[in-house]
Image (cartoon, coloured by chain):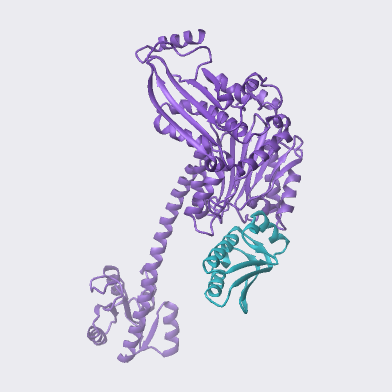
Chain colours: A purple, B cyan
Amino acid sequence: MNGTPDIPGPPTSLTVLVADDNRANRALLTGFLKKLGHRVLEAESGEQAIALFQQQATDMVLMDIDMPGMGGYEAVRELRRLATEWLPIIFISALGESESIVRSIESGGDEYLGKPVDLKLLRAKIVSLQHRLLLTRQLAQQNQLLLDYQAKNREEQAAAQEFMRHMSELDKINDPRVQYYLRPTEDFSGDLIAVARTPGNQLHVMLGDSTGHGLTAALAGMPVLQLFRSLTAKGFSIGGVAAEINNRIKRYMPANRYVAAILLSLDEESRMLSVWNGGCPPAVLLNPDGIPAYQFDSKHLPLGIVGAEQFDSDVERYCYGNHHCQLLMTSDGAVDAVEHAGMLQGMVSLLNAARGKRGAMLLLALLQLLGEKLGGEPQMDDIAMILVDCPDDNAISEALAGGVGGMRPRPQTTVARPAGQNHQGDETALAWQFSLTLTAPQLRNADIVPMVLDVVKGIESEFPQLSSTLFLVLSELVNNALEHGLLQLDSSLKHDPEGMERYFEERTARLKKLAAGEIRIKLSKEDDGQQSLLKVTVANDGAEFDYRAALAASPDGGLRRHGRGIQLVRNLSTRFDYDDNGRKANVCLLLKDAAPSADSAGQQRNTQQEFFDE
Amino acid sequence: MDINTNIDGQMATIYMNGRFDFNVHRSFKEAYDELLAQPGITSLEVNLAQVDYLDSSALGMLLLLRERAQLAGKTVVLRQPNSVVTQILDIANFGKLFTIQ
């Protein structure tokens, strides 16, 4: 309030309604009130008082009790009924003291004054009521503000909830390998679930638990979800995804905010799980009978606590072999709800309920247990559970054959079968070319392939179709260069599940210690007017590689992954050979839309068909 | 939850009890701010013996305390967590950040 007189608010000058049938009394009161600076409305009866009150804004009433027609008590009862806010009322009467005071109060009066009126006393009572009026009006105003705020807040919450629902993209999770349950304590969930596939079709799943719950927790989770999806789409390894998310949270969130998370990668080909667990209850692998076979305990601090230099992106790997397993991940809210006595007991109860069940039935059994344990009481924390199907050979082939929508086909290749050479004799024009040399420090820390893909994406408009093929080829060649050339790992280890885990442990250990060595990657795109070719060279300065043996190896020998990568690259490329005793791999990829642009679609097909048949 | 503090020479102890969660956020912060402001104190102990439960915001408060203490050049020790609280600290791997005795 700025004190300007015409602003309604604290009334220093009141409009006072004086009701008295005696003209002399009215004159006395009116004169006195005007002297005090107030405006006066005069009424001769109860009826007139009510009529005036309805016509004009009134701040206070002085009411005689004994009037002809409608008396004071009745008039006040009516005024109280009509008033939309508190109206200070002073009864003035010559009637016998205590009985009339009691009736005054009963009919709704605030003060009582006997006749003859003591003007000093009247003034004091007016001032005191004026204060009360001021406070009441302020309170009403604040109340209104609060109501307005509440309404606005409700609206914003609803909008934010809608927004978050979209951002979380929960409704877009439709990977056949994943089932989940998410129940927040409030309108917003601090528990996060995200599912995505890499360009190489590895399944990435995240269960996150952002500190606290409600809006702030959910808000903190949004960039985490987005980052998880975009890094996975770029082909980052699961440990790399964890590291990037960690660094981001560390940068933008205060020290007391973090996200406990399990990040999982499932390689259906080699039946290997890679898990990074920071601060979540163990992720438990259930064998085909629903009995715990392995558990991935929390080995790390939650995301967002330590800086990039201290962050540990090591994952725990486990090969589940040719058994159709399931992996259960839960947030601590789920475990807590089942057993307050502690995480371990809660986990045991959940796993007992899961015993012997699969898929949706398993989740239902867990929900039933949660319902019983909560017994109608509200949950203390957000609850999230994810069940990931880890298929064996049968499950994969069933899904493929039955078209259950289960197994996804291999990513679309954008290149022709390796049937011939580039058309000879035409001028080839270089569209673009770049090369990149990575030395030990980058090799130790960086996810190389996504980095290179990012560069290509920046310059190549055809990238969307090219992405998964290039990802597969580069991953294979870079991994070979690193694992055989620089780290000199023994790939025969990969023949059985235990060996496979040892192989990766060894890989991690040697990579950490890698002091020297380099990998050179060169990419170029050439266009001869008929075809577009992408040439990829990956070279290293490490050990020689017996590429002839690798190329000759049956893809079914040993664990399927072994030797298969090389075969895959050969299938995807128009040319694939090695130089420098296996240290340098050259691959040529034919881009799909290679026909001359002047050709019609039909001719284009013909051109490509001829090319295949050559 | 009551929070009491005790100073013994260069060492200050914060005693807590019951459920350590967001509701004690303000009083916990007041307690450690006051202790960290005293130049004579070099190490700070959070005694968890009487704490039945910690939630994620309590872990967040401990992280904040750790950060403030580091800035002030003081050490923080968590003492005597019961078995439930120990499990919670273990799952979060807080042993990598704090000395827990």
Total tally of numbered discs in the picture: 0
Q: Residue at x 49, y 47 (%)?
A: A222
- Residue A215 seen: no
| Horizontal relation, residue A416 to residue A599: left or right | right
Q: Nearer the viewer, residue A496 or A10?
A: A496
Q: Is residue A293 above or below residue B44?
A: above
| Horizontal relation, residue A528 to residue A270: left or right | left
Please state the horizontal and vertical placement of residue A612, each as a whole percent of the image: 50, 10
- Residue A435 seen: yes
Q: Is residue A365 above or below residue A260?
A: above
Q: Residue at x 67, y 42 (%)?
A: A328
Q: Residue at x 44, y 11 (%)?
A: A423
Q: Quadrant of the N terminus of chain A?
A: bottom left
Please state the horizontal and vertical placement of residue A308, each as a whole percent of the image: 53, 50
Q: Nearer the viewer, residue A403 or A104?
A: A403
Q: Nearer the viewer, residue A249 or A341?
A: A249
Q: Quadrant of the rendered structure where residue A544 is?
A: top right
Please state the horizontal and vertical placement of residue A363, each as a whole percent of the image: 67, 41
